[in-house]
């Protein structure tokens, strides 16, 4: 304890010995040092023309903090020391400030509030150009005059000291000229400056280069590489050449000297090359892979050379290689720049990879009717360009394809480059409309000769964005594909769709009944994000061919704040409306107590649940609006700006997101939500249709009709004729919905009349209404399709008249007369 107290007392004694003025140096006075107008010289310049003299650079101290703590009086004095390395000050340029007389002119000055203050006789700072001894002086924060005093140099003249009397203020700059003479002037030598102060803390204060000696030379750069196809011509981007030393090329070259640009093996300069430097024609010689330019007086006096008008042909360079241009100037080292990239296709499609892919909601129009999202449904901007002039082949088609279920509502194209009197705007607004119609509004087909060949001087480049809408069931990335005979297939992701709501439901196996047949499971609709569903937005639930009976129970979770109204069942459709938006969390709506009205004539099979919002889609799913093909009729078309108004806008500018083939958008929420496992009536178990199945052919004959099938019949390794189950069953007259497949058990089920037929992959048995029937051949799966032996299939379906023609390898299932 005694030792500790002794240490404290000793420390206190040391502190008491420190002068009060020293307390200012506590990082409360800070300045940042920098050099402005640093000089680069050649060895000839610094040794001959300049006699080793350096003039122009300045050391500047910018004060970022000026919180002086002491003393209030007398005036603060802070001594600065400026030290040179490999140089000595030109002391005659500075004059002197000693004993209150002398002047520095602008060799040491202060800049404050936009005004430059120079040292007048007596060391006072006065506004630039005013040498008066009184008035207009620079004052410090205590209204004292600021002065420079005690300017001196050491005997080697590489160190200057001076004192600033007065307090520097925050935002002021103290500048010191670095007029000096370099000691060593060989190539690579530099002159540096360092600075320190008694009071101020100076950052970046050591070894700042203010003069350097460099070898004569050039540096070169190119704006970007240019893509070029093999045996094609492309225009190089501008090549910029600068001297490494001196302010102009006069420092490194002279008139009559030569600038050369040389291409690597596999490239040559094209015949239409028209060389210009800084926009002016120059004397030059083009010799296959090299251009020689003679330096003239204008070029000698220039600060930089911008070389343009260079056209290059890839004569034998291979795809993927990068070509460099070697640039030489008499007396200087050669430099190279990468300027060419050889590609194996002539037209490219791209988007800005630094841009975020826009996210929009599916199942709504371009105005987001029914939801609160404010996105504009615009895709990323797509750039399509030629890699060389004339790359677009006007004799061949070009096709852009979007994913199925995504439609174009509007397009916006920018004025393309490369369009002149010799060519038309290929990707113009008008051509987009024609191409979308040509592609039946599922793709954009630019037919051949849509554009005349581009014979201009610039490669064609066009940019466009697409306003997109999507089916309610579409979710994921929107990948735009470009392909055609003249281009390599390319893909870019231009947008992403997410659903404004998701539906959770289970399959329900039901036996035929009449009224009030209760579905044992609930349907759950979940909002994508809180507050997304707008007020008065409605939802409707409907089944194929089956009506919902009585009102269902619709409940909302107790956390989201969503409120609903107008819950009803009308026309076999369950519906409800949003009364107040959710706020805290996304809403979850549960529809339970669903009951069915089941007509006794309903065949067994699967029936889909459809969920839609008339507010979002412009679609009414009431049963009275079904057309004869059981598709939903679009009753309130709307949205804005659809590309092809002739088809999309029968009511002026109102549009829907349905495709132009009058098909409804797909909004099935759960396929097979209701699965009737027993038929409503006893249909006859016999068939009247004659079905002919030729082995190896991609078709079969059903009655008088030729039906295309995706997988043909075949003869297996054991010699059995194997027929595709679904294709033959449908051809005989069984509804496709009554041929079911369970992936988990790999079992197929066929329901026809009073029969339920089951067969499982790999087994040599077939079950009919639960009864096991041995089969001659095991059930097989080929190309994702189930196949049964000819006789086994006939037995299972009850077709007794089966013939086989070995000569033509044709199976015939004769329906009962």
Image: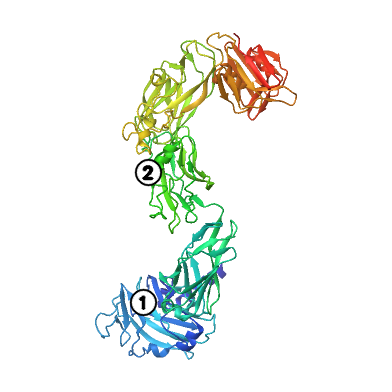
Distance from the alpha carbon under mark 1 to that under mark 2: 80 Å
Which quadrant of the figure contains the N terminus?
A: bottom right
Q: Is residue 648 above or below residue 485?
A: above
Residue at point 39%, 17% (across, down): 571
| Image location of residue 128, percent across then percent down | 29, 80
Q: Is residue 722 above or below residue 398?
A: above
Q: Is residue 551 above or below residue 270?
A: above
Residue topped by disc 2: 430
| Image location of residue 110, percent across then percent down | 34, 78
| Image location of residue 145, percent across then percent down | 30, 80
* Mark 1 residue element: loop
Report if the CB atoms under discs 1 and 2 are less than 8 Å apart: no
Is any atom of residue 37 visible in this view?
yes
Residue topped by disc 1: 71
Total residue callouts: 2
**Residue 540 picture quarter:** top left
Residue lying furthest right: 718
Q: Is residue 400 left or right of residue 690?
A: left
Q: Nearer the viewer, mark 1 or mark 2?
A: 2
Q: Residues within 10 Å of mark 1 (few under 14, many from 20)?
A: some
Residue lying furthest left: 135
**Residue 700 picture quarter:** top right
Is any atom of residue 655 visible in this view?
no
The one nearer the camera, 136 or 28, is 136
């Amino acid at each position: 304890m005694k030792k500790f107290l002794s240490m404290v007392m000793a420390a206190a004694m040391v502190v008491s010995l420190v002068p009060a003025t020293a307390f200012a140096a506590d990082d409360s006075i800070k300045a940042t040092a920098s050099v402005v107008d640093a000089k680069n010289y050649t060895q000839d310049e610094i040794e001959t023309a300049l006699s080793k003299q350096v003039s122009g650079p300045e050391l500047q101290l910018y004060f970022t903090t000026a919180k002086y703590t002491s003393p209030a009086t007398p005036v603060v004095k802070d001594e600065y020391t400026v030290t040179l390395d490999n140089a000595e000050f030109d002391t005659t340029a500075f004059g002197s400030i000693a004993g209150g007389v002398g002047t520095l002119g602008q060799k040491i000055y202060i800049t404050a509030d936009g005004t430059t203050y120079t040292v007048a006789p007596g060391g006072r700072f006065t506004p630039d150009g005013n040498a008066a001894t009184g008035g207009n002086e620079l004052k410090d924060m205590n209204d004292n005059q600021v002065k420079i005093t005690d300017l001196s140099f050491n005997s080697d003249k590489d160190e200057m000291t001076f004192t600033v009397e007065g307090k520097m203020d925050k935002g002021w700059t103290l500048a010191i000229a670095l007029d000096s003479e370099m000691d060593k002037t060989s190539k690579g030598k530099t002159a540096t400056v360092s600075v320190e102060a008694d009071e101020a803390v100076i950052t970046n204060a050591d070894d700042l280069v203010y003069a350097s000696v460099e070898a004569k030379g050039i540096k070169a750069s190119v704006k970007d590489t240019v893509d070029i196809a093999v045996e094609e011509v492309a225009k190089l981007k501008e090549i910029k050449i600068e001297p490494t030393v001196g302010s102009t090329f006069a420092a490194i070259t002279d008139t009559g000297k030569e600038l050369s640009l040389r291409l690597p093996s596999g490239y040559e300069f094209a015949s239409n090359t028209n060389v210009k430097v800084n926009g002016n024609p120059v004397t030059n010689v083009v010799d296959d892979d090299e251009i020689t330019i003679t330096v003239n007086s204008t070029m000698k006096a220039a600060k930089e050379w911008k070389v343009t008008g260079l056209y290059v042909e890839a004569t034998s360079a291979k795809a993927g290689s990068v070509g460099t241009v070697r640039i030489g100037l008499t007396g200087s080292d050669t430099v190279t720049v990468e300027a060419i990239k050889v590609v194996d296709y002539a037209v490219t499609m791209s988007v800005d990879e630094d841009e975020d892919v826009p996210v929009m909601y599916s199942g709504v129009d371009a105005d987001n009717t029914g939801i609160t999202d404010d996105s504009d449904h615009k895709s990323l901007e797509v750039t399509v360009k030629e890699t060389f002039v004339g790359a677009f082949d006007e004799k061949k088609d070009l096709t852009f394809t979007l994913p199925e279920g995504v439609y174009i509502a509007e397009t916006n194209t920018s004025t393309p480059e490369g369009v002149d009197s010799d060519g038309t705007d290929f990707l113009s607004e008008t051509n987009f409309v024609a191409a979308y119609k040509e592609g039946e509004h599922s793709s954009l087909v630019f037919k051949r000769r849509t554009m005349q060949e581009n014979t201009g001087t610039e490669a064609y480049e066009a940019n466009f964005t697409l306003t997109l809408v999507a089916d309610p069931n579409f979710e994921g990335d929107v990948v735009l594909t470009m392909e055609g005979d003249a281009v390599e297939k390319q893909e870019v992701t231009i947008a992403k769709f997410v659903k404004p709501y998701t539906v959770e439901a289970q399959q329900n196996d039901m036996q035929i009944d009449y009224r009030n047949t209760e579905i044992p499971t609930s349907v759950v609709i979940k909002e994508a994000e809180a507050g997304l569903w707008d007020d008065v937005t409605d939802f409707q639930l409907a089944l194929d061919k089956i009506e919902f009976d009585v009102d269902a129970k619709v409940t909302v979770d107790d956390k989201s704040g969503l409120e609903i109204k107008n819950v009803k069942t009308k026309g076999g459709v369950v519906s409800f409306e949003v009364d107040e938006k959710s706020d805290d969390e996304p809403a979850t709506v549960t529809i339970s107590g669903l009951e069915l009205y089941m007509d006794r004539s309903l065949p067994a099979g699967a029936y889909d649940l459809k969920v839609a919002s008339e507010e979002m889609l412009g679609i009414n799913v009431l049963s009275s609006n079904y057309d004869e093909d059981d598709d939903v009729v679009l009753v309130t078309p709307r949205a804005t700006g659809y590309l092809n108004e002739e088809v999309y806008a029968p009511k002026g500018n109102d549009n829907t997101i349905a495709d132009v083939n009058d098909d409804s958008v797909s909004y099935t929420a759960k396929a097979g939500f209701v699965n009737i496992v027993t038929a409503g009536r006893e249909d006859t178990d016999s068939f009247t249709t004659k079905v002919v199945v030729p082995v190896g052919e991609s078709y079969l004959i059903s009655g008088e009709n030729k039906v295309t099938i995706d997988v043909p019949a075949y003869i297996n390794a054991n010699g059995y004729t194997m027929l595709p189950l679904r294709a033959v069953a449908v051809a005989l007259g069984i509804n496709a919905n009554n041929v079911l497949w369970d992936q988990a058990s790999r079992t197929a089920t066929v329901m026809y009349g009073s029969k339920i037929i089951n067969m499982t992959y790999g087994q040599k048995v077939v079950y009919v209404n639960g009864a096991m029937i041995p089969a001659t051949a095991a059930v097989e799966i080929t190309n994702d399709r189930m196949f049964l032996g000819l006789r086994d299939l006939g037995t299972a379906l009850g077709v007794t008249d089966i013939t086989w023609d070995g000569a033509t390898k044709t199976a015939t299932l004769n329906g009962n007369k």
